[in-house]
Structures are given as C-alpha cells and as structure tokens.
Image (spheres, rainbow, N blue to C red):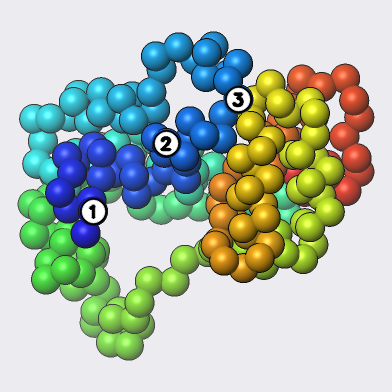
Amino acid sequence: MHNVAQELSDAYFDHMSVFRDGGLEAVLSPDLRRNLGDYSPRRSMQELFQAFRHLPPMEQMQAVDLQTYLPGDILVKVDRTTMAYSLESRAPWLDHRLAELACRLPAGFKLHGGAGKHVFKQAVAPFLPPALLTRSKMGFTVPLAAWFRSSLTTVFPSTVLHKDMEQYISLGEVRRLWSEHQSGLRDHGQKLWNLLMLALWHGRYRSPRPVAAEVAACG
C-alpha cells in the first residue's frame, strides 16, 4: 500500500531496488558516500520517468523497463545462463515489428480485469488448456535465502567482510544484515547477493589479492 501513495517513479524505484534511501546510505562507506557527492539513484529514476511524462502511467513503466530492467536484468541473464551451458535461447517477442505493434496497443489490450497479457492470452486461448492460461505466474527465482544459510555461509564472510571492502561498504552494517539473516529473523538474501557480487567484482578487477577458487566459482 505504501507505493500507492507515491509518485509513479518513486513507486517503481522502490519496487525494483534492493537497497534504497536510508538503507543504501547505511551500507555504503563514508568515503564512498563522499565520493558520490549528490548522486541519487532515486533521482536518476525520476529523471528517466520525466522523459516519458507524456505517456500514460503504464506505458511510462514499459518505456523505463525497455531501457533498464529488460537489457540490464532479464534478457542479459537469460543470454548468459543459456550460453554458459551451450544452449541457444530466443526471445520471439523482441522482434521489433511485434514490439512496436504491442507498444501501440491500448492499455486495455494489455491489462484487463487485473490480469496482464490480455490480448495475447485471448489469441492463444483456442490452442491452450484454460488451466495453463489462468495459473499464477511462475518466475525463475533462485533460493538466495537458503544459499546464504548453507553453501555460502563461509564464502560470504571471507569475501565481503574483508578489510579491502571498507572502501565501499560499512562492515558494521553488513555484519548486522548478515547476523539478522543467519538468525532467520529477516530475509536479506537479495541484499547479501548484491554485496557478494560487489566483492567478487572488486576481487577480480580492483584487488591485488587473488580470489579464492570457491569464490570465483560463485561468479
């Protein structure tokens, strides 16, 4: 309900972000905050939405998705994952002619009665069983919470809670998040994953110290 009362750009930012505002400030080191100056990821998102302010709200979010979420997350991860196992993957809905047609469709063709992909589901309804069309969305999430309480319990502290990382993060705040997660009181899986990826990037590209074999395997 919190997002309902916000501007569209702020609601989108809160929904898509792992660290935001006070939580981000708390986890960043004082030196990094100082070097970032007045940079604000929330303000950057607001400026992006401003560029599409002439569009209806749903189309604003779709336009931002096309510039951020799709190329920076969904599509690149599918490509990397399939290529890692020598698989060919195709995203047929990215044909520019089909994408342009979809963007021109009225909002009611896309979202109808609270359900998405309305016109697409109507088009394929004669060929698929109703149960398949009406079932809940099934994502491809990974069990981060469980990983950080099992296979990554030694990798995370040795990689992230390291003196080299003090230039980027507040180790005290990260230890607090780690402790809360291990206790089972909170699920900080996504936050811990982002911090682990930052540490792996540092170990590979910025740090003179070698990256342990087990940590490299996680990347």
- Rendered image: mark on residue 29: 3
Kind of residue sitting beneath label 2 = Gly
Query: What residue did someone put label 2 on?
Result: 22
User: CA–CA distance between discs 3 and 2?
Assistant: 13 Å
User: CA–CA distance between discs 1 and 2?
Assistant: 16 Å
Quadrant position of residue 64: top left
Residue ID at (79%, 57%): 153
- State which mark lies toward you, 1 or 2: 2
Residue ID at (52%, 19%): 33
Q: Judging from the image, what secondary structure is the residue with disc 3 in?
A: loop
User: CA–CA distance between discs 1 and 3?
Assistant: 28 Å
Residue nearest the observer in this picture, 214 or 114? 214
Any part of residue 191 in sight = yes
- Rendered image: mark on residue 204: none
The quadrant the N terminus occupies is bottom left
Query: What residue did someone put label 1 on?
Result: 2
Crowd rating for badge 3 (residues with CA inside 10 Å; few <14, some 14–19, many 20+): many
Any part of residue 48 in sight = no
The answer to whether residue 174 is left or right of residue 125 is: right
Kind of residue sitting beneath label 3 = Ser
The answer to whether residue 201 is left or right of residue 101 is: right
Q: Judging from the image, what secondary structure is the residue with disc 2 in?
A: helix
Q: Is residue 123 above or below residue 159?
A: below
Residue ID at (64%, 25%): 168
| Sequence order check, earlier mark of 1 and 2 | 1
Point out residue 139 in the picture as x, y percentages from the top left corner: 47, 66
Total numbered circles: 3
